Image (cartoon, rainbow, N blue to C red):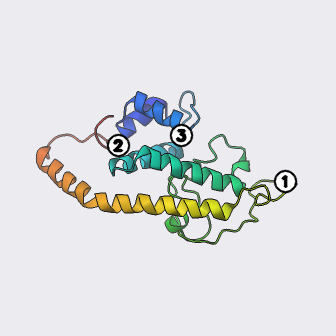
Amino acid sequence: MHTFADLARALNRSAVYLRGLQTRFVLPVLEGAAYSDSYLAFLRTVAFLRTFGVSEDALLRLWHLETKLLTLLHVDSTGSPTWFLDACGQSKHRKRRLLLTNHDLGVAIPSRVVQLGLNFGAALPELFAGKEMGEDALRVLEEYLIALGTIRRNVGDELPHICSAVSFARRLVPQTAPRRSGASGPKK
């Protein structure tokens, strides 16, 4: 478990920047050493994607689509206050996982197949199905896939520039300089 200061240090980001992320992504603010490795993994993913030039607006859109999809699939019924982060950092079945929440959908993404009857909670079923209430998991998945495709293209376009920047940085920073563990770039 990590403190908020540990998160800032591990991500090489200021506390103000991380607080802003917590606010904009509507993440729980915890006290003391209560931040899990999965919470850190989520923030690290956001920091990496921002490094690749993915806008925060694009990430917020993807985040809302992922959490909406997981809500429609009843993943939110686990009782955890960080249910949407609990799979972050998992590495098995990478092609079946959503990008930000890292939740395993059970099928390769992109896929148009989702088991709509999945219910991860033991709560009583709704009177009407989600589709009848206007919430269609397949529609949300389609929107998610479009947003994910845009992010993947943006990262792919930026990758050669990042590789060149890393090469430049290696020439700029003496190899004898001590490396800070967990550093992921300049403070923002």
Q: Is residue 135 above or below residue 46?
A: below
Residue 14 as seen in the image, left or right of residue 135: left
The CA span between labels 3 and 1 is 27 Å
Mark nearer the N terminus (1 vs 2): 1
In the depicted view, which residue is nearer to us: 54 or 11? 54
Residue at mark 1 to residue at mark 2: CA–CA distance: 45 Å
Q: Percent from the top left, x then y, of residue 140?
A: 62, 59
Residue corresponding to mark 2 = 182
Q: Secondary structure at mark 3?
A: loop
Helix, strand or loop at label 1? It is loop
Choose top left, top right, bottom left or bottom right for residue 112.
bottom right
Q: Residues within 10 Å of mark 2 (few under 14, many from 20)?
A: few
Is mark 2 in CB contact (under 8 Å) with mark 3?
Answer: no
Q: Residue at x 61, y 64 (%)?
A: 105
- Residue type beneath disc 3: Phe
| Residue that label 3 marks | 25
Alpha-carbon span between mark 2 and mark 3: 22 Å
Secondary structure beneath dot 2 equals loop
- As rendered, which of 146 and 5 lies closer to the eye? 146
Say whether residue 160 is left or right of residue 3: left
Q: The disc labelled 2 sits on which kind of residue?
A: Gly
Q: Which of the two discs, 3 and 1, labels the residue nearer the N terminus?
A: 3
* Rendered view: 107 above or below 72: below
The type of residue carrying mark 1 is Glu
Q: Residue at x 54, y 41 (%)?
A: 36
Left or right: where 29 falls relative to 55: right
Residue at mark 1: 126
Residue 79 falls in image quadrant: top right
In this view of the protein, can residue 157 be seen by the observer? Answer: yes
For marks 2 and 3, the one nearer the N-term is 3
Q: How many marks do you count on the picture?
A: 3
